Image (spheres, rainbow, N blue to C red):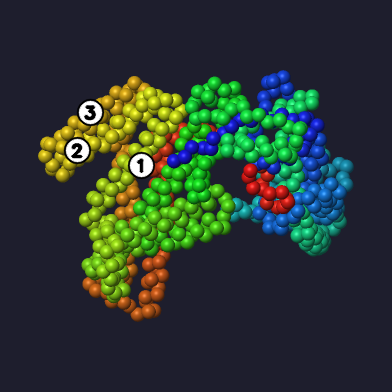
Amino acid sequence: MSLPESMSRVVVVGTKSHMEEAIEAFYSVRALHVIDHTAGTDGMSIGSPLPTNTKASERLLKVRAMEKELGIGKNTETSKVSADELREQISYGSVEGVEAEVLKVLDVRNDLNRRITELNAKKKSLELLTAIPVDLELYSGYKSLAVIVGTVEKDPSEALKALADAEIFVSFKKKKKKSGGGVAAVFVKNEDRDKASSILSDHGFVEFAVPEGKGPASGALVLADAGLADLNDKLESVEKEVEALQIKHKTFLRATDEELSIEIEKGEVPLRLAVGEYSYIMDAWVPTKKVQVVTTELESRLGNDVHIEVEETRGRNMHEEEEAEERFKKAPTKNNNGIIAKEFEHATSLVAIPKYQEIDPSILIMFFLPLFFGFMIGDCGYAIPFIIIGAYGLKVTRHKDWRAIATVLFFGGIWSFLFGFFFFGEAFGMHFIGHWEPPLGMTWEALLGVSMPDWFSGIMVNGHGVSKLEDDVVMLLKLAVYIGIIHIMIGYICGFLNVRRQHNNKHAFIEKGGWIILFIGMVVLCYALTQVLFSKVPLEGMLLYLLIAGAAMLVVGVAINFKAEGAKAILEVPNVIGMILSYTRLAAIGMSKAGMAMAFNYIVFGMFMGMTDAVVWPEWYLLIPLLLFLAFLHFVVWTLGILSAGLHALRLQFVELMTKFFVGGGTKYEPLIIKRFKTIKQETNKEV
């Protein structure tokens, strides 16, 4: 259990004329969490972006437009370039030069795409008009005639006969399912146009323009096909040029995107500061252990142009936060965990960022999440793939979600192997040691026809491991309950420590002490009752004293909680039993996994191979497919194990443990820091 790092609030005052150099220094120390200035305070206004931001923003827009057109994304593989050399290239107009080269090719491509689109639309119209025996030039050029051409859903021929002196051409196919329809061309007097349009609209008419041309539509269609082929050939050639430009400029564009983004981010820092006519003021949080180093670094870089003062070192008592000015109330949270616990911070952040004044649950999750996962799996055979996949994931991925999954698989796999070997003594649902007890009592010792040495059985519980499906089920359920009691109790203790630190002992006793007393009383009371009801132990002696003590503590706990929370305290009493029983899932999921594995083993070895009374291996040509089938079945169990054990282990942390002490709602520590992926800068990127 650990608290976030202690934070100190500092004020940095400097001359406005050297603000650009100061911003570079702020980023170099990599420790200043800026507190945004509020307009109207201290008689100073919010600053303006640096003058270079306008040009940098224009160039960044051009770069991102080129990246989009060339198909260059964040995941495009590129080599790293020197940031200093890149800035020099940008200042000499390299962005504009690349833009001119790219736009020249893109303009040709866009023109070809436009012409292809237009020609495809013309081709579609011509394909429809091939069914009408009218040359293209005859569709236009009339003064007294109106020409209406379009598609129809129903045959309008009969309805159009009502039009006098009209020439009607209809090519229609009966609809079959969703296909079909037809095309109609109607030549009518100008005064009958509206009447003809009304008739056609009743038949699902959609008008289209007749392409210009001469002769039959079929001839024009041949020319259109030839034109499309020519344009597509040209487009293919241009696409190759675009691909060549992508290869040529991808490194420059990705690096420039990063460098310009950094420049703009730095240029916007004045928007977070208080700026006067001649000076600026920056309020910032700094980890207390780094204050002296940060001060020394800034003074060495800026000399007499900067003055730094430590305003406060924020404590953990809530009254310090409540009494502070609004923008100084919340100190940011910088997790204070080791290299392994740091991998579990993402799991905590899925709920909330820890408050500055409360215990970070990441260390508890680091221990209990893999432990519960391993206990529920509890199998050497399934553990090894978990360890391998988890180790590989931790090595290759940097994505937070995938690293979190890989971390649980790796450490959960280790626990699973330890439980599977020393506690349960099994792999793939079969115990290592034991005699063949048909039909379901299969063991590796009997299956492989070997005899394990005495020392091997000596390192396992009971000499052969704990059975998940036979005599040891009750013991497993009890063990799960005991684990739950310890787990929940740790949560209550953390809650007591949090409130004690944030307020005082009295406050902590009233808010959390009552729950601790109630919880202990409920555990003692339930223990005594179960001994009487299920183990048939007489209610006398020590057992009677435990029953009375448990009941008394339960009453005292409810009384204290009632003072703090009212009637809710009474309503929550039954929930304590539910919380404890919730941990029986640790045994239940392990038993369900073992039951599936045992059933699959029996299907293959017992039913298909006939090993009901003794081990009799089939011929190799039957053995191989049967073993492959068995591998698939165990893969199903393994996959379900990830889902069930992973989700339920996580649930016990979020719902049963963290709710006892974790409030969250903290502000993430985000110092001024530049992370480079596509560029390299000579200055060190290590934190101060």
Instruction: Please report the residue visible at 71 percent of the width from the left and 30 percent of the height from the top.
Output: 307
User: Percent from the top left, x then y, of residue 69?
Assistant: 75, 51
Whether the residues at callouts 2 and 3 have beta carbons within 8 Å, the answer is no
For residue 45, say whether it is visible.
yes
Image quarter of the N terminus: top left
Place residue 147 in its image quadrant: top right
Instruction: Please report the residue visible at 29 percent of the width from the left and 75 percent of the height from the top.
Output: 449
Residue under label 2: 528
User: Percent from the top left, x then y, of residue 325?
Assistant: 59, 22
Per the rendering, the mark at residue 487 is 1
Most foreground residue, 421 or 239: 421
Asked which secondary structure carries label 1, the reply is helix
Per the rendering, the mark at residue 552 is 3
Horizontal arrangement in the rendering, residue 666 relative to residue 202 (left or right): left
Instruction: Inspect the image, locate mark 1, and give the three-letter code of the amino acid beneath it.
Output: His
Instruction: Inspect the image, locate mark 2, and give the three-letter code of the amino acid beneath it.
Output: Ala
Most foreground residue, 676 or 180: 676
Q: Answer few, some or many: residues within 10 Å of disc 1's Cα (few below 14, many 20 plus, some between 14 and 19).
A: some
Q: CA distance from mark 2 to mark 1?
A: 21 Å
507 w.r.t. 121: above or below? above
